Amino acid sequence: MNKNTTKALGLATATAVLAGGVAATNTVAHADDVKESAQSTTADQTSTATQTKEQAQAAVDAQQKVVDTDQAAVNANTTDTSSKQAAIDGANSQIKTANDNKQKVADDTKAVADQQKVVDQATTNKDAAQKAVDEAPKTVSVVTPKPTDQQMADGQKAVTDATDAQKQANTDVENANKTIADVKAATDNTQRDADRAAAQQKVDDQQKVVDQAKAAVDAAADPDAAYNKAVSDAQTAHDNTIKTATDAQSQAQRAADAADAAVTNANKDVPRQAQGGDDKGSFYPSDWPSTMFVHNLAELPTTVNDPFTGGDDAATRQTIHAMLYYQDNGTDTSEHVINGQITEAQFNTLQSYFISLVNGYRTAHGLGTISATTEGKAFSDYITNLRNSLNMGYNHTDMFDIHTGAPLDFNKDRAKVTESDHAIETAANQSGFHNSSEVQGLLQQSTANVGYRTMADLMTGVYQVVSSMLYDDGMAIWGHRTALSDPDIKFAALTINPTHDADSNKLYKGYNYDIQLETLTPVNGKSVSDFHTLDNNIAFNLINTTRATYGASADQLKAQTDAHTALDAAKQHVTDVTNSADATLASAKADALQVKNAAGTNIDTLKGTLATAQSTLTNLQSALAAVPADIVPTDEQKKTLADAEAALTDAQNRVTSSAADLQKAQAALQKLTDDYNAGDQAHDVANPDLPGLQASLQKATDALTAENQKLQDLQNRLAADQDAAKTADADIASANETVAKTTPEVTALQAQLVDLQKKLATDTDDLKAKQQLLANIVAADAAKQASDQAQTQTPAQEPATTQTTPSDQSSVNGDGQANQVAAQVGATAAPAVQTTSDVVVPDSLSRIAKSQSALPETGVKATNNGAVAGSIALALAGFFGVTTIYRKKH
């Protein structure tokens, strides 16, 4: 094949590949525009010869502007539609909120109406309870019938039984005493001990006679030696006797010293009763003396001492202020008041301490004592429950509304104060009292809050309250002391309740209490003897019992007494023994001298006297040995004695109790007899139904208060919801107007969007057709340029013959030729595109890429750009591949 044939083959191949590439670029279009697009493509391809590249590029740019304008119109439509739809959604939400608020108002209105009915019923109930209390008589007439014959017989029988019991107890005492006497008589060694002592004394006396006779015999043989020995022996006996006594005295002294030390050591920790004193003007100084603190029950005072100096002038007394104060030093073992809950026993202790301290003051000033009573406890319970149920703060009970607990102003709320006073007095009357006054104090917690307060702490607080009322009351014009010093009061009732005053609870952390003492006098017709007084000594007994637990025990004190008694006896024994020993020594010396002087007497006579004395001594010693030994009680005798002693104790106790029972039975019989003789008696007593009616009134009052609070809460909620719903109707109207106006606009925009999207699609297809035409023109220009360039590269000389190798042959014959061209295209395509600058059209391709990027279908850009570039590259590769083969062969 000559070079022209080869060159023609390369051009044909390039043209065919380029045509195939151009055809491939028109394979992407809308499904509904395939026919129109195909026709447009055919027209564009056939018009390649009639349009220049610049004209095609201008058409693409113009069409791109049309597509951009369409896209902007679609975007603007979408934004406007979204904005108006958001306005519709907001209006619908506003309508729902407004309707919800209107429903809340309707619900609240119904709830208020329903609760008002409940309040009306509670008011009716309270009024009915109040009417029942007001109309109930304060007293009722009760007829006490005279005792029946059976009651008289029972009373007489009680006296007889008590008399018999007392007689039996006395008999049992006598029998027990006799049994004890019999057992002791059977085991008594008194006579035997006396017989033994008398026999021993005779032996001792006779021993002296024998000694004297023997000394006389010895003296007759050697008077001087006998005398000296007798004197020496007497002196030794004298000294030994005294030494034994003094040793016993020393031992007794040591025992007494040990007992004294034990008592002294035990008494070191005995608490002193705390006393108030002068603190030099500081409220709670750090250097207070220990007597100004209370650490435990044993240190609590049993009298109120004035901690001030000067007169009753308030200003003067406040300059020297020293009240007792509780301090925890680890010695307080008193009961705990857990979580502010005072038990009944603890309450009784605090009440008795308060009243006992007041009584000490009253007694010291010549006034009668006052007492707590069973009846007064009922009244104090009424006050406590009233204050707690209405959360009354720190002020007198009558200074609060009796129904609601609201604080009262004495000057502005005089009628309500009077009403409260009347209610309190009525409650006191129910228990048989007039309420003379109410004095009030505060038991504040000044120690760390550990979940409890001790009784020593609370009782110290009571002492502080009483001391302040009696000695630190100038700021109250001594009103508390005046009330406690009232000579007419006979009784008192204490009330203790948790403090409901916020300021006090904030100032004093922990468990704080209001404490009130109600002073009372009997109502007309009642006397002191008509009431059941309570023990006022509970607190003082507790204090004294606690004090007794400190210091030396009873055994230690008894041991001390016994030791000193033994020491005194030992000292006296030394004195007695010394005197006796001195007399005995003097007598022995005199006897020895007498024997010495009589040494000339017949020795045989002296020996006879000695023998007689010794015989008498032997007989006396035998008599001493013959005295019977002491009797040892048997186990049975011991048991009999123990049983008899126990029976005696029991019998003696029954004698005492039976005497009291007899006295009581006799008094009861006497009252029965008096009542029997007096016949039926009528008298007035407190209406027993009134406390129940008052309790019902209190319950109804509490219920009304609670229901009123619920009503107030509902009314507050209704007002809040009404405020929120004030603009509901206007909001709904405005929102409906917005919906009515905007909904058609949204509908129109949505219809317009359909038209805009159709126009955008049509204009986009036009743009793609123009882009295809531009691509065809670019490809044709490139192919023509390549053809022209190939024709200018003709060699100077052509060989005569052409030889082909098997491989060369396959390159130009049949299928082998096509395969070889394809292989060459694959090997040289990339270099050909990169190095042949005159076939690359960057501006046109760049504009095509830019225009394609604005199209909705992303696949169009990739297909056209790739197809056009690929077609050009493949065409050029084919062309340069053929020319390369040619250059290799030539």
Image: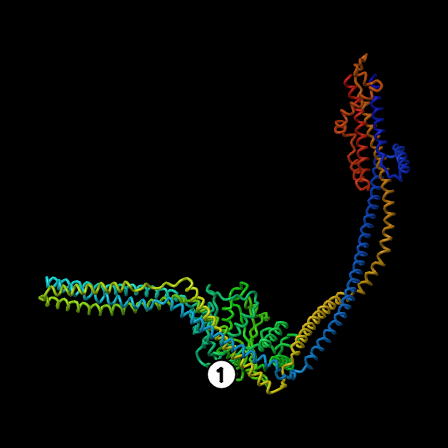
Splitting the image into 4 quarters, where does residue 784 fall? top right
Quadrant containing the N terminus is top right
Splitting the image into 4 quarters, where does residue 278 fall? bottom left
Amino acid at dot 1? Leu
**Residue position marked by numbered label 1 in the rendering:** 367
Q: Is residue 441 left or right of residue 195?
A: right
User: Please, is residue 376 above or below residue 14 in the view?
Assistant: below
Residue 496 point in image, percent of width and height: 57, 72
Pick the residue in front: 615 or 455: 615
User: Please, is residue 727 above or below residue 755 in the view?
Assistant: below
Count of marks placed on residues: 1
Q: Is residue 810 left or right of residue 669?
A: right
Pick the residue in front: 232 or 644: 644
Residue 716 point in image, percent of width and height: 72, 69
Name the residue furthest bottom. 678
Splitting the image into 4 quarters, where does residue 776 fall? top right
Q: Is residue 242 visible?
A: no
Q: Is residue 27 visible?
A: yes
Residue 373 point in image, percent of width and height: 56, 77
Name the residue furthest left. 600
Colour setting: rainbow
Residue 527 point in image, percent of width and height: 56, 84
Pick the residue in front: 388 or 854: 388
Residue drawn at (82%, 52%), measured in percent from left and top? 81
Name the residue furthest top. 800
Bin the neighbour count of mark 1 within 10 Å (Cα to Cα): few under 14, some 14-19, many 20 and up.
some
